[in-house]
Amino acid sequence: MEVHAHTHTPRKKWTHYFWEFLMLFLAVFCGFLAEYQLEHKIERDRAKELAASFYNELKADSAALNTVKIFRERKHEALEYLQAYFQDSSLVNCSNTFTIQMMYGFFTISPSLFEPRDAILEQLKNSGSLRYFKSWELQKLTGDLSVSIANLRKRNAFEEVYYRENIWPFHLKYADMKWYDAIASKSKGFIVTYLKEYEKTGGDVIFHFNLPENFDRKGATNLAGIYKIIVIGTGNSQYRSYDSLNTKLQKALREEYHLK
C-alpha cells in the first residue's frame, strides 16, 4: 500500500494581508484623486470659458452704452432747445435748426435707450454655473449686475411710456403727417444716419406746425421740460449704476482669469 505525502500550503502572515489591503487602498485612493483632479480641471476650464464669454458680453454692452450716452446727451441738448423755443419763438416758419432739434428731442427714442445683453448672465444664473466662479467678489458683482439690469429695464419702460403717452399725442395734435412721410422716405429706416447727415449738410424737409394758432405753448414747454428731467434721471441713476458695475466686473474677470 502506497503512502502519499500530504502537501501543506503555508499560511500567510498578517503582514501579507496588510500589504495587500494597503495596495488596494492606495489604488482606489489614487483613482479617486485622479477623478477629483479631472473634475476640478473641467470646472476650471468651464469657469474660464464662461468668464471669457461673460467678459465679451460685458465689453460689447459697455461699447453700446457709450454710443447710447452720446445720443442721450444730444437728446438732452435738443430738449433744452425745444423747452426754450416753445415759450415764445415763431411757429410759422421753422428753421433747419428747429427741425434737427425736433427730430433729436421728440422724434427718436430707440437710439437713446440702452438694452443690455444678458444671455450669458442668465445662463450663469439659471444653470447654476455661477458656482464655477470661486471668487466671492465675482459672485456678488454678478448678482448686483442682475439687479441693476432689472432696474434699468424698468426705467426704460417708464421712459417709453412717457414718450408714447405724451410725445406721440403732441405729434398727432400739432404736426403734419407729410413731414413724417418725407422723413421716412429719405431715411429709409436709418433715422440716426439720416439725422447725422441732415445735421451736417442741412435738408429740405422742414418741420412745420399744423394750426400753429392753436398751439399750447405752456403745455409744450412743460412737456419738453419733464421729458428732459426723465432723460437726465435715467442717465444719472440706472445707466450710471450699470456702467459702474460693468466696469468693476470686467476688471474682476480680467484679474481672476487673465483675460484681455
Image: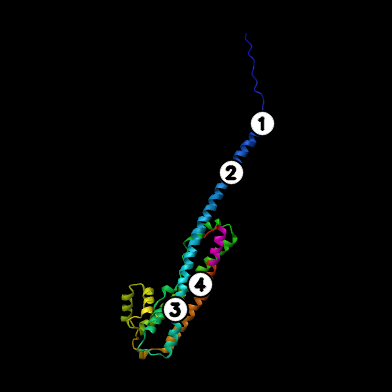
- Say which amino acid is labelled 4: Tyr
The residue that label 4 is drawn on is 239
Label 3 Cα neighbours within 10 Å, binned few <14 / some 14-19 / many ≥20 = many
Disc ID at residue 249: none
Query: Residue 244's spot in the image, x, y percent?
Result: 54, 69
What is the CA distance from the residue labelled 4 to the residue labelled 2? 49 Å
Q: Which residue is drawn at 34% across and 74% down?
A: 187
Q: Nearer the viewer, mark 2 or mark 3?
A: 3
The residue that label 3 is drawn on is 75
Give the mark nearer the N terminus: 4 vs 1.
1
What is the CA distance from the residue labelled 3 to the residue labelled 4? 15 Å
Query: Residue 217's spot in the image, x, y percent?
Result: 42, 89
Residue 24: which quarter of the image?
top right
Magenta segment:
247-256
- Say which amino acid is labelled 1: His
The residue that label 1 is drawn on is 16
- Say which amino acid is labelled 2: Phe
- Say which amino acid is labelled 3: Lys
Q: Which residue is drawn at 41% across and 79% down?
A: 104
Give the mark nearer the N terminus: 2 vs 1.
1
What is the CA distance from the residue labelled 2 to the residue labelled 3? 63 Å
What secondary structure is marked by label 1?
Answer: helix
Looking at the rendering, in which quadrant would you find the N terminus? Answer: top right
What is the CA distance from the residue labelled 4 to the residue labelled 1? 73 Å
